[in-house]
Every structure is written in structure tokens, then in C-alpha cells.
Amino acid sequence: MAKGNISVQAENIFPIIKKFLYSDHEIFLRELVSNAVDATTKVKTLSLKGEAKGDLGDTKIEVKINKDAKTLHIIDKGIGMSEDEVNKYLNQVAFSSAEEFLSKYKDDATIIGHFGLGFYSAFMVADKVEVITKSYREEAPAVRWECDGNPEYFLEPHDKTDRGTEIILHINEENLGYLEESRIRELLNKYCKFLPVEIKFGTRTESTWEGEGDEKQEIKTEVDDIINNPHPIWKKKPADLTDDDYKNFYQELHPYSQPPLFWIHLNIDYPFNLTGILYFPKLTNNFEVQKNKIQLYSNQVFITDDVKEIVPEFLMLLHGVIDSPDIPLNVSRSYLQSDGNVKKINTYISKKVAEKLHSLFTTDRKGYEEKWKEVSTFVKYGMISDEKFSEKAMSFALLKNMDNEHFTLEEYKEKVKSNQTDKHNKLIYLYANDVKAQHSYIKAAKEYGYDILEMDTIIDNHFMQHIEYKGHEVTFVRVDSETPDNLVQKDETKESVLSQSDQDKVKDIFTKSVKNIGAGQVELKAMSPTDHPVVITRPEFMRRMKEMQAMQGIDMNMFPDSHNVVVNSNHPLVAEKLLKMKSEDKKADFATYLHDLALLNQGMLKGEELSNFISRSLEFVK
């Protein structure tokens, strides 16, 4: 038996490895299985070149647990190591055989590992590690290497006869959870689900039926349980795939999800390497940003689902997979560095999404419009947060009106400019964000010939400001922010049927009677007799600011709700009935009642105030 000391660059490195090599200790399994994949890839490459003799046979990697012995085994049938190679690669921390192999066979093989420290991650969970290995070179005898987490190691001959490497981890007391089948299966599914070599973890029972009728019997067979898909569709050519292939793979990534709206297959080899598939999921109206739905792989090894450095922020709502060996990673492979390649990838993905959306719009506008309600979230978010995307999206971003018609920004401008240009030559885009609650306002605005947009998603406040800011000479105005005659300010004004003296009396009655209007005001206005007697308005600027602050989590109790009370001096109930009442108390009650009607119309009358209104209504009926 040979005995020696592992060559390290820092004194007593093992305590550092055990505690700090990786932020998540569970990474050890990914590292060791990835090494096994590398070893298998190497021997396949050598076989193709005629340097590894004979039939390769079964090249599955096996992971197995021995609970009694408290050991976890990772077994491959890959390239293996000779005694000299064990001395060279295992006994020199941070020296990686992958680098040497890559330099020799870089055009023929894809090697996952580049760091050399991956193997030593085993010591984060194990008190002792054994490596039993035999080189693919038939003349090289097998050896067993052992180390208990100190620089001292043991190396001796072994009777292993088949090619490959078995790593045996003697799991320490703190990490006995890694001897549970459910835990190992979870980690294999997370990190190794798409590794390019089949990985066996236990067996499963398969049933087949033989015979006919009463003679029919079930035959049960034990077969290897292969936990990964070695040939994921993102590695294939789009021309070789059907829509069902993409939909089935989406279910593989996100079981029990609704089918995606559509997808983008990424495939580029210059100036960086990147493949992947991004899916547009169906979103609910009040969507929540579901992060961590895009998985990053490096040569089919799961790296992270925190991809904010790589994917533009507005596309974090997408689902799918990105695979790139060119993304720089630190030793843990978990944290991305912001370098030139990452920025190029970010730009490329944004560009591909814009191209896909533009293509859908131009080739199948009807289908695009049908998907718009869900797609709009991505587009609007993208326009707000990404300047280049915003420029491209101007041609395929849509506005939808109450008649379920869709328009590009330019088309809508042409549609409404003749009737909705105000006296300051500004285009007024009227919108509703709650069709049911604002029904009467919508109806009133339509009677003036105005078109009303539906802007009811959580992101629309920001989107409208973005369009206004981009210098389109457009102002968005919500239908309940003004009286219908003043939503689009024109030069013409209506005359009041009341004298100035009577107008002052009406305003005084309402000012004294109406309650709980916050910082709002009572205003008398000459409108059409067919308009409502009292209209509640909420100034656009203050209301929009309040809604945006609420979205940002600011406590809106600091800003009491307020509204303006606009009294229509030309309505018969005001101009005739109210002023003819003799009792001041009756006038006050009637003014309060008209105000309550306006509040009720807005869904703003609740609790005790609603109960009182119902009681007064019953009295009026009597």
C-alpha cells in the first residue's frame, strides 16, 4: 500500500472545502455525477477515434445507497484512471484532468467540469471517500484510493476487473439525510434530469400482458429506473420537432400546467454558444411574477434557476430552459458574473422574443389578437423596462377597446384623433380599468361618441405612463376622472339654467351636506339635463399616483381616499326639485341622497353609509 500527502496550494484546505467550497452542500451529488458523465463522454470519444478498444457495452451511470454501511455510491463505466492518473488528478487539489483532455480533444467532446475541485465536494458530506477505479487501458491494473478528509491518503491495488470508477462516500452523522432514497431522487431530478448519459437509480416494476381472454396474465419485470432524459428537445433541430414535442416537454418541465401559448427555440453558435426553449405561459389577469421558472444548464448540467443576469427582467415571466457552456461561473457554478458574453446573451434573447412576437403578429394577426390578453403582460413589461425592445414593440403592441377591437398604437391614433383631440391639440385616450364598476361612465362617454380602451391589468398604469412619456402627444384619462362632457376638453361650454344666485345656493347646500370626500371639492357645472345629477370624479394624476404607490407596497392609509363631487346644475332634480324644497333639512337630506346615489354608482357606498341610504330610500318611497 502506498501512502502520501495530497498536494495542496493552501495549508489545511480540507476544513475550508468542508464548510465553504459550495454554498449548498447538496451540490456534491451534481459534481460527482457530472464527473461520471465526463468520464463516460471521454471513453465514448476515445472509442470513436479507435483509441479505446473493444465494445463499450452498457455505459449507464449508477447511483445507489447502502443504508447499513452508511455509504452512497456513484458508479460509472467511463474512462477510469490508472495509478499514475490517480496520483496526478486526485492528489493535486484544483488540478483538473478535464482541461488537459479538452486541449487534446476539444473538437470531439463536450466536457462538463473545468475546475478540479468538484470531486472534493464529497468531503462536505462524507467523513471518508473511497475511489475504486480501472483505466480503459487494459494493461493498467485497478487501484483503490482512500482519504478521510485530511491531506493524508492511501493508495493500493484492487481486484476490480471492469472499466470505470466507483466513488464511495461514507456519509457523516450531520448529513445522514443523503442516505434517504427520496432525498437523492429529489437531487438527481433537480441537477441531473437532462444529463447526456443515462443514470440508473434503483429499479422499477414494468407490467406486460400475455395471452387472450381468461388466459390473459400480467407479467411483472424489474427494470432499471432511469431518472433522466439524456436527449432533451432543446438539443435537437426545430425542423425535427412537432408542436406536440414542445408541449410534451413543457409538461416534463412543469407537470400539470396549462399548455403554453407558444414558444421560441433558441439556437446560436456565434459569437457564443446557446441553445434552449422559452415558453410563453398563460398568465392570470392579476399576475404574480413567477421567478425561477427558467432553468440554466451548462452542457445539460443544471446550474441554477436564478437567471436574472442572463434573461432580461421582463422575460423572467417566461418558462423554459437555457443551455450555454459560455456563461462564466464561479467555482460553485451558482452565481453568474456580468461579463461580455452574458450581456450579449441577454440582448440576443430579447431580440429573439421581439422577432417571434412580430412574426406572430404579421403572419397570423387574428391568432395574435386572440392571445393578446395574455401576451400583453410580456410586451408591456418589456416596453417599460427595455428601451430596444420598446422600439421594436411599437409595431406589435396592441390596444383593445370596449368593442373587443384591437389596434396598433399608430392605428388607434388614426381612429380617435378627429373626435378625441382636445383644445390643446393633445390626443385623449379614454380608458376603464373596471368595466363593471365604471359601466355608467363608459355609457355616458360613448354617448359623446368617444372610444373607450380596456386597461385592466396590474401593469397598465406603468404602460400608459410609458406611452405618454415617449412623446406621442397622448394623455390617458380614466372615464371616471371627469364629467363626460369634459373628458376631452373642448372650447364649447354649456350655459346653466340657474341664475348665479341660485347656483351659489345649490353649491352651499351640497358643500354643507356631503361628507367624507377627503381633499375633494364640491363643484357646480352646467351639463346636459340627461347627464347624472351628481357625478363623482377622481383626478387622474392623484388617483394614478396613489395606485402606483399601492403597487409598490406603500401604506396608502397615509393618503385618505378623496373624490370630487360635481353637481349638474342643469338636471331637473337639482335645478327644480331641490331649490323648490322649503325645509333646509329636506334640502340637506336630498343633496346627501343624490351624493349617495353617485357613490353607489361607483361601488363606493358601503357599511353603515349603505345601510342609512337604504333606510332613507324606503322613507322616500313611502
Image: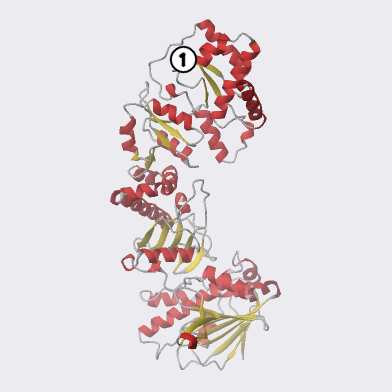
Residue 486 place in picture, x, y as percent: 43, 22
Give the quadrant of the C terminus: top right
The residue type indicated by label 1 comes to Ala
Residue 29 place in picture, x, y as percent: 57, 73
Residue 401 place in picture, x, y as percent: 39, 37
Would residue 429 be seen by someone viewing this image from the given angle? Answer: yes
- Residue named by callout 1: 526
Q: Is residue 545 left or right of residue 45?
A: right
Name the element at disc 1.
loop
Seen from the viewer's position, the closer of residues 17 and 393 is: 393
Instruction: Name the outermost residue toward the front.
Output: 622
Seen from the viewer's position, the closer of residues 176 and 437 is: 437
Q: Is residue 391 above or below residue 325?
A: above
Give the quadrant of the N terminus: bottom right
Would residue 324 be seen by someone viewing this image from the given angle? Answer: no
Q: Quadrant of residue 31?
A: bottom right
Colour option used? secondary structure
